[in-house]
Every structure is written in C-alpha cells, then in structure tokens.
Image (spheres, rainbow, N blue to C red):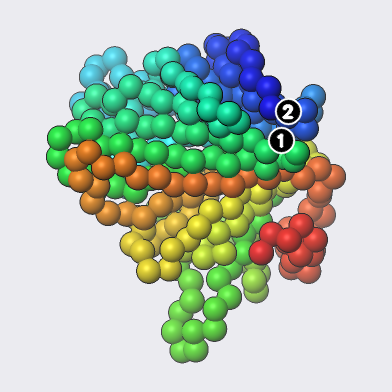
Amino acid sequence: MITFKEKDYKNFGKCLEISNGIVDLLVTLDIGPRIIRYGFCGKENMMYEDINRITHNKSEEVKEVYGDDAVWYLYGGHRLWISPEYAETYYPDNNPVTYEIHENEVFFSTDIQEVTGLQLTTTVMLSEESSDVKITHFIENCSGESQKFAMWALTVLDRGGVELLPFNTEDTGLLPNRTFMVWPYTNLADHRVHFGDKFMTLKSDDTERAFKLGMDLRKGTVAYVNKGNMFVKRFVHYDNSEYPDNGCSFETYTCATFLECETLAEYGSKPDGSMVSHTEYWSLFDKVEVKDPKDEAEVAGIFEKYELL
C-alpha cells in the first residue's frame, strides 16, 4: 500500500512523503520541486542535501535574464532542467509547487516560468511491492513561439560512492562506437575516473576540482554504489535522434560535495503549445559494495547479478 503524507523536512520546508514501507521519497512543496530523498525506510538518504545552500548561481548573466534579485539554488536531490546550459537554464525555482495524487502517481507542477514561458511537471509513481520508481518529466511550451531545447533530468547524489557506467559494445568495424564529450575543466587523468574495456567508473570524494563527462549511453543504465546501497537509473537512448552537447544522452559531474547522474532527452524544436516527456526508472538495492572500481570483473559481476543490462 502506498501512503502519502505532508511533513516538514529539515530546512526544505513542506514536503510530500511517498512510501510503500520498503522505500520512501520526499518531494519538496515549498520550493523546486526536488526529489530530496530516496532511500530505504529508516535508512540513509541516497540524495545529496544542500542544507547550507552552498551551491547557487546569482551571476550577472542570471540576473540579466531573471532580475537583480534572482538566485538559483541547487538544493540537492533530483530536478528537471533544459539543455543546452545557458543563463535561461537557471530559472530560480524557489516558489511553491502544486501537486495532485492520481491513484499511485503524484503530479508535481510549477507555474509557467517567467521569461522562458515553459511549464515543468514531474510525476512520481512508486511500486507497491519493491523499490522501483517511475519518474516522468513533462515540459509544455506556453511561450507563444517555438523553442529548441532538450529535457534534462539531473539526480544529485551524496558524496562518497562510485558510479558504474557501461560502454557501448556494438561492433562497428572500422567506425567508432561511442562518443565522449569533455568539459574544459575536466582532467582525463583524474584519479577518480577509470576507463576499462567495457565499463567506466567514477569515484566521488572530497577532491575540489570538478569533473564532467558526456556520452551517448546506448545501454541506458547507470548505477551508483554508496552507503552499502546501489541506486540504479534507467532510461531509453534513441539511436537515430539528435542529442544536445554534440550527442550526449547522458552526462555525469562530480565535485567535492556530490555526484550527478544526468539523463537527456532528444534535442529539437518544440512548437508553441506542444508538450514533451522524458522518463526514468529508478531502483534501489541494499548490501552492495564495490571493493575495487578498477576491477572490470567485479563491475561486470554487479551488472550481471542485478540484471542491469
């Protein structure tokens, strides 16, 4: 049985708790929205919580778009954005969120954004019998004109774990079978990242220098092992579609405080009045550890054991 309960949570204000007795999620209602918690009931949160509002953006570029008082806050947890990343992306989503419960699915909606004219909605559907969650994102273009963007779903996870990513394995002969995009501040010799034969791993620790990498993740699966648990995110990569950032359907970012698993939908023009959607499927497993992120056999064994590919 799924239960829904409003409660105050730390300094995030009013939230909606969604629980099936196995796992619970908390979705902010006074701000965002953010899925600020996902974890086993009574156990640690897999999400990063920016309690002290350390990460924010009040740059001159953002103020030029949204006004002199505009400040965007990370907050932590899971959020919906638009890509490519420009000043318009940093809409200050600091206002209350409305929600509606339809059986076991909850719809969280924001007001139409000023300047962009976009309205964002995120739905959460929790399984009655497992940790499985279906997260569906919607963006409606209410601006009065066509806009070109991609939906961008970012999950900000707590520091201290290791991310596991499967490479594309198609045999393309003399042609390449994978794309990597590297951001200017990324050091490919970073000690946190390891490139294997069929997998890549990325550790999250207290290293200050940021690291970001994008790719065409055709397997549509990523895992993050932390606190003895494993968070798994699945999505659909469409082979014949255009993706932002020169072909990225997945991007990952880490710094001294958190790690982000980011999925992206198709990039293209969205006519006025149109609505697009992007879906992720989450799962959580307990008693999972990675002893050596550089051990390809160990990583492959985890993917095989939990049937992730």
What's the residue type where badge 1 is placed? Answer: Glu
Out of 190 and 144, give the one closest to the viewer. 144
x%, y% of residue 156?
56, 37
SS of the residue at dot 2?
A: loop
Quick check: 138 left or right of 100?
left
Spot the residue most to the front: 103
x%, y% of residue 198?
64, 71
Residue marked by disc 1: 128
Residue 60 visible in this rendered orientation of the protein: no
Residue 229 visible in this rendered orientation of the protein: yes
The quarter holding residue 160 reads: top right
Out of 105 and 69, give the one closest to the viewer. 105
Residue 1, disc: 2
SS of the residue at dot 1?
A: loop
Quadrant that contains the C terminus: bottom right
Classify 105 as above or below 213: above
Residue drawn where x is 33% and y is 22% of the image: 111
Classify 42 as above or below 237: above
Residue 50, disc: none
Spot the residue most to the left: 145
Out of 59 and 29, give the one closest to the viewer. 29
Labels 1 and 2 touching (C-beta < 8 A): yes
